[in-house]
Image (cartoon, grey):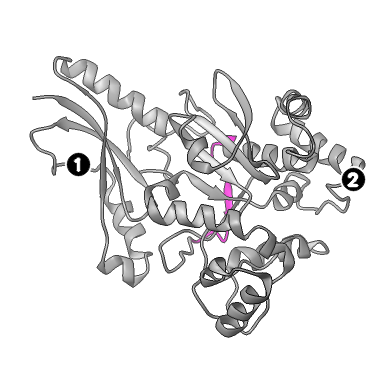
Amino acid sequence: MKKQIYKITFPTNKIYIGKGVNGHPLNFDIEDDARLNADFALLPKRLQHNWTLRKEILWESDSCSDEVLSQKVVDFINDYQSNDPAIGYNLSPAFQPGNNVSGAWSIGIDGCKGGWFYAASNTQQHNIGVVATLNELLELFEPIRLIIIDIPIGLYNAGSAPRQCDVQARKLLKPRGSTVFPAPVRPCLVAGSYAQACEISEKLTGKKLSQQAYHIFGKIKEVDDLLRSQPCLAEIIREAHPELGFCMLNQGTPLLTSKKEPNGIKERLDLLRQRLPITSALYEQALNQFARKVLARDDIVDALMCLCIANAPLPEQIPTSVELDPEGLPMAMRFIS
């Protein structure tokens, strides 16, 4: 029988990497069931009563020795960082913050006129590009450690209650809290016009929508459709707000300059260089590679901020306790300080 290495994705959006043989497809072990049970208790009742596991075969061999299999599983644990308590349930090898020993990719993404601009890096190389869809990007990189994207993830279906991550971000960003616009409720995303979207929003929440939110409906819907159709991706695709990221890098003080102006771009690049040494190289490469009608300067800066967060061994988040939407998607913003 073939010896295999598998990945289990749990309804908590965390993973476990294990080994076994293909003669026992339903068997798997987990080292940290106490933490799994604690995470499971935080899920909405709907998900606690109706959940699925996904088992994915990552590698298999007809002839490898037990020693090779044991080393391979450690390699995959390091690749996926499933020993990081924020990502998975493996207990060994012990997780060492700041030690990304693998070639796993960290990726920052921001929407742009040409689609999605990404900045990616691992321990060996870095890369930038523009893709039309997120599915296209996912085909370019393997394995992926973490994707940080500047787009709302996790939406309510109705009600006037705002996402707590939006509330806390606006509070931290005062007097520039308006840069965090309220996320729409999910039914608004199918509206054919701004007027129709406002009508749906008023009916379900009692409030109209901002033009800013409506203008990125297509991208919000693309991310929402992707994560709802492939829930396992929610373990590696997380939300950030670049201005919150810059605020926290600036010792908790919001930047008052506009990212649309040269002095605002410079201020943000200076902060990024302190934590992301490849900032200047990636920024200049992007400027030279793509026309401004495809990619604006502030789109580059925002994606680099997202990459900076994705590169961090243990990014923080607001709110600190995981808040899930009705579909089980996490509603939280990642940042580093």
Residue 315 lies within the magenta run: yes
Q: Is residue 217 above or below residue 301?
A: below
Mark 2 vs mark 1: give the one in front.
2
Q: Is residue 146 left or right of residue 298?
A: left
Q: Is residue 47 above or below residue 13?
A: below
Residue 165 lies within the magenta run: no
Q: Which residue is mark 1?
A: 29
Q: Nearer the viewer, residue 294 or 260?
A: 294
Name the image quarter holding residue 201. Answer: bottom right
The picture places residue 22, in percent across and down from the top left corner, at 12, 32
* Spatial CA span between label 2 and label 1: 54 Å
**Disc nearer the start of the sequence (2/1):** 1
Name the image quarter holding residue 83. Answer: top left
Q: Nearer the viewer, residue 316 or 119?
A: 119
* Disc 2 and disc 1 in contact, CB within 8 angstroms: no
Element at label 1: loop
Q: Nearer the viewer, residue 1 or 204?
A: 204
Q: Quadrant of the N terminus?
A: top left
Q: Nearer the viewer, residue 277 or 320?
A: 277
Question: Could you tell me which residue is drawn at 53 percent across and 67 percent down?
Answer: 190
Q: Which residue is mark 2?
A: 261
Please give the range of residues in magenta: 311-321
Q: Count residues near mark 2 (Cα–Cα under 10 Å), then give few for <14, some for 14-19, many for 20+.
A: few
Amino acid, disc 2: Glu
Q: Is residue 140 left or right of residue 93?
A: right
Amino acid, disc 1: Asp
Which label is found at residue 298?
Answer: none
Asked if residue 40 shows in the view, the reply is: yes
Asked if residue 337 shows in the view, the reply is: no
The picture places residue 44, in percent across and down from the top left corner, at 37, 69
Q: Count residues near mark 1 (Cα–Cα under 10 Å), then give few for <14, some for 14-19, many for 20+.
A: few
